[in-house]
Image: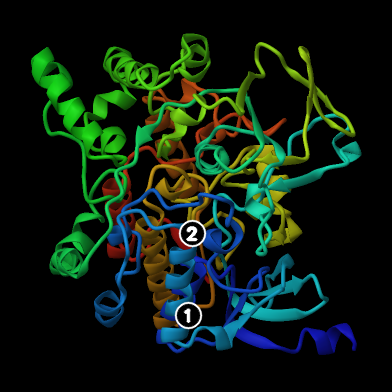
Amino acid sequence: MSNVQQAAKQVDAVVVGAGFAGMYALYKLREQGLRVQVYEAGTGVGGTWYWNRYPGARVDSQAYIYQYWFSKELLAEWNWSERFPAQDETERYLNHVADRFDLRKDIQFKTRVTAASYDEVSQRWTITTDDGQSVSAQYFIMGTGGLSVPMLPALPGIENFKGRIVHTAQWPREGVDLKGKRVGIIGTGATGIQVIQTIAGEVGHLTVFQRTPNYTIPMRNPKYDDAAREELRAQYPMLKERVQRTFAGFDYDFEDRNFFDVDPAERQRILQRLWDDGSLNFWIGGFREVFFDEKVNAEFSDFVRQRIRERVKDPKVADKLVPQDYGFGTRRVPLETKYYEAFNRDNVLLVDTKATPMEEVTEKGIRTAAGLHELDILICATGFDAGTGALTKVDIRGRDGVLLRDAWAQDGVRTTMGLQVHGYPNLFMTMAPFSPAAAFCNVPTCLQQQVDWIADCIGFVRDQGRHSIEPSAEAEAKWVAHHDELANLTLVPKTNSWYMGSNVKGKPRRLLAYAGGVGTYRAKCEEVKASGYEGFVTA
């Protein structure tokens, strides 16, 4: 087949990814009468909840706000089983949505988009896939997620290991037999914690390789009966509006009071109440000063450190598990269930890789400065190239053929509201840098906000009889400056984490997420629409 024939297929919009964002984008754009083609690398829908099926995988936003709001019928018919559902339940929900709204007919599975180029004459994108297909689209939407490009540890000799190596984000559907095995796990972030607490009682021996200990919050996860579900459903109209205006897109928000206007005894009572809620409320529903004031942050940090020590029998092990060199909430805060109790078990060994660095992987296991740890299976809970990874992995070429990854490497990452990039007309993104969705947001809240904005923007272009839209260089520079100003007011840049890109060697260190909060972000997006997309250029 010739290249001309291959490029013959034309649609109005191409969406990459069939997770929360991609499925909603398909639904919204089809509602506007557009012909939409979705490409998905996996064999099914679900995005994060398709790929991340490791032991213990579980959502840590409450189910009743971790869902779509666009359909009253969907809200009425889906029954969540518990406050924080496991991976398989969330995946079932997303499959139900795909079936309920007949989305699969416009999704091509087992297909990875490898390149996209914009033609200035036709004002269209040509999108190429890994199987050689080519399609032409006026609008190109990257719904590829902020945590979707896994990172393997850069350890010498890793290819020599005779056992099995598996990354948590590439966990096989058939599972991995861990029973009685000598298992090692690298990483104690949110994912590593879920795995460790789940498999500690199943494996023969578990060696945990920890570089940075985490502050955590104990999860309180009650089951729902019909009465509880109906009580929640009665609140859905309120919750739908509430999550749009809070700092992190949850149904709770920061205290109105200043931390130091509350007497110390009352502050401790408030912290204990938030802690007992068993959710991220302690982090993003307490006092906003935890993100800005080192004295406030220290009080939060000490509170959590004490709770960790209370649960670990060996004081020397507790010393390793208690963070000391950064403040609470400046890294991603995980929820956990009996995580610390895992380290009270005789078959679990904690290795502090700062004290005894990992030197190499051998045929038999991992050698640290203190000796060899023999393993049958190595689990890598080593995270992702967050925010930018899924966007720079694709060869995206805008005006004058400029490759997006090269532009960002040369001039630094830049977006306008995490939705568009100057020089790339009709390219839209979700969960991209400089939006709250990059870190500080209940993801479904932000993704639905962003897809709504994208759909409205495309509707505006079509209503105006235009063909393309992009932010001006001036508008983009203004947003980036606003983002950086807010980021530098927080304590987050003081800590190394994936929030700052510091988990990827050579990646510029910069806060990826918009720190102004979901409510502020939504208001600014609404201002742009109300202004007739002032600062954006149409052609």
User: Residue placed at 64% from the left, 38% from the top?
Assistant: 382
- Quadrant location of the N terminus? bottom right
Q: Which mark is residue 98?
A: 1
Give the number of the disc on residue 363: none
Q: Position of residue 519 (x, y in %)?
A: 26, 49
Mark 1 vs mark 2: give the one in front.
Answer: 2
> What is the number of the mark on residue 87?
2
Q: Which colour scheme appears in the figure?
A: rainbow
Q: Secondary structure at mark 1?
A: helix
Q: CA distance from mark 1 to mark 2?
A: 17 Å
The x and y percentages for residue 344 are 49, 24
Residue 429 location in percent, x, y? 53, 60
Viewer-closest of 442 and 207: 207
Q: Amino acid at mark 2?
A: Gln
Q: Quadrant of residue 362?
A: top right
Q: Residue at x 49, y 42 (%)?
A: 477
- 435 to 529, vertically: above or below: above
**Tag count in the figure?**
2
Q: Is residue 350 above or below residue 228?
A: above
Viewer-nearest residue: 400 or 353: 353
